[in-house]
Amino acid sequence: MNSTKIRSQIHKYYPDLSKNLKKVADYFIENSDKIPFMSVHDIAAATGASVASVVRFSQSVGFSGFSEIREAVANSLQSQLQSNHKFPLINDSELDNLLVRVANQDIKNINETLKMINASDF
């Protein structure tokens, strides 16, 4: 499941969530890059909700629990990192500009470096 689908799923259930669960939902949407590295206790503390509320939120948006939604977010981020081009090149029509050529070379180098790094090892 990609991040867009996860966000869409959260938005789908959002109107039916309690005020407290909406805080957790907002945190998930705004901090999806942090979620895989956080425990249920960390998210509860960050949102002012209880651990049970974080678990209840996960279940309310269609997951079996916190571990499943955290894993879905982590897999989504890993998929994004494994795409071939993390950074798009600058418009080719401007390649006669030395600065643009240097920037494009840097972008290519970054993309090649990211391809060589195993995300799970990192």
Image (cartoon, grey):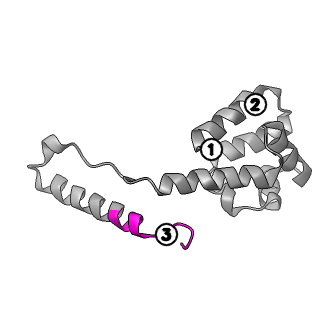
Q: Which residue is drawn at 27% across and 49% down?
A: 89
On the image, the x and y values in percent for residue 113 come to 36, 68
Helix, strand or loop at mark 2: helix
Check residue 32 for magenta coloring. no
Label 1 neighbourhood size at 10 Å, few (<14), some (14-19), many (20+)?
Answer: few
Q: What residue type is labelled 1?
A: Met
Label 2 neighbourhood size at 10 Å, few (<14), some (14-19), many (20+)?
Answer: some
Instruction: Tell me the magenta residue range.
Output: 112-122
Which quarter of the image is occupied by the C terminus?
A: bottom right
Helix, strand or loop at mark 3: loop
Q: Which residue is drawn at 63% across and 56% down?
A: 74
The residue where tag 3 is placed is 118
Q: Which residue is drawn at 88% across and 54% down?
A: 51
Helix, strand or loop at mark 1: loop
On the image, the x and y values in percent for residue 3 come to 59, 43
The residue where tag 1 is placed is 1
Which quarter of the image is occupied by the N terminus?
A: top right
Q: Residue furthest bottom?
A: 121
- In depth, the one of 55 and 84 nearer the eye is 84
Mark 1 in CB contact with mark 2 (< 8 angstroms): no
Q: Which amino acid does label 3 sit on?
A: Asn
Q: Which disc, if any, is residue 14?
A: 2
Mark 2 in CB contact with mark 3 (< 8 angstroms): no
Q: Distance between the residues labelled 2 and 3?
A: 35 Å
On the image, the x and y values in percent for residue 70 come to 72, 54
